[in-house]
Image: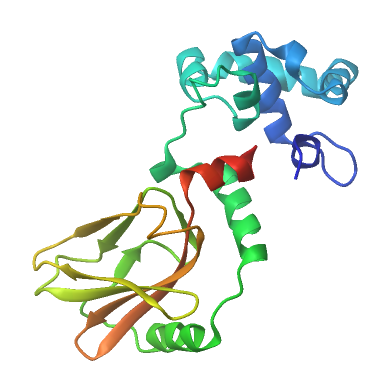
Amino acid sequence: MNILERIFDEDDKLNMEGRILYAEAMHLSKVGELPKKLIDYIWEDDESRLAVAELYELLDAQTVQENPHIYFKQFMDSNSLVSIDWNNLDAVLEDILRTTLSNQYTPNRRMERRMALSLKTSNKTLQVTQPEKDAICVQQITFQFSKATPQSYRLLLQNSEEEEIEEFEVPANSLQFQISIQDEKKYPTGLYYSTLLVDRTPISNRLYICTEQDAREMLS
């Protein structure tokens, strides 16, 4: 999806992302780098021009400089790529990645049935609150629990072919457990399933792992 498809709806109306993009361009002195269609629209539409002016005042200049819209990556020096907080993706970027990945990978039917069964028989003693279903994980996966684990548990990570990628041990008294997935050979971009073995009730979930390079390409 190119930038114009993202910022203009089916009725050719500019959305909020487009207004924010223009306001950020003003902070970055890169209005001239914006698509001509966007520039023309802002100057021809009084409501959008007023909204952009308000957004310009609301946006923090330093924040924009440090983490601008992904669109501006192409205009930056190759040695200073746009800094993105991969562990706290904003809703827009995460939705773009999720849509792209869901179109590329087919869920495993047996794993999906296992996941559905685990939801129906959810463990009342312990619940996995994060990651949520279809979460986008770049660089690391952070598991959060509804309360401290009363004992140690096995945690399995499988790919969409049901191949076990790795097994972990979540220590007792854990409220959070993190897995580093920066090894791109071991954790290539794709669809995965996590399963926490709690007593006789496995808690399974579906998530996407995406390498940083693939994520940047999808967002460009």
Looking at this view, is 141 or 6 the one in front?
Answer: 141
Snapshot quadrant of residue 192: bottom left
Q: Residue furthest front?
A: 185
Q: Which residue lies furthest to the top in this view?
A: 29
- Give the residue displayed 65% in from the left and 29% down from the top: 71
Snapshot quadrant of residue 128: bottom left
Q: From what the image shows, is residue 211 above or below residue 53?
A: below
Q: In which quarter of the image is the C terminus?
A: top right
- Give the residue displayed 76% in from the left and 11% down from the top: 32
Q: Where is residue 132 in the image (x, y as percent from the top left)?
A: 43, 63
Looking at this view, is 219 or 205 the one in front?
Answer: 219
Q: In this view, does 81 lie to the left or right of 70?
A: left
Q: Where is residue 50 in the image (x, y as percent from the top left)?
A: 75, 17
Q: From what the image shows, is residue 126 above or below residue 209?
A: below
Looking at this view, is 107 or 135 the one in front?
Answer: 107
Q: Is residue 46 left or right of residue 65?
A: right
- Give the residue displayed 65% in from the left and 56% down from the top: 100
- Give the residue displayed 25% in from the left and 55% down from the top: 178
Q: Position of residue 27 (x, y in %)?
A: 60, 11
Q: Position of residue 205 (x, y in %)?
A: 41, 73
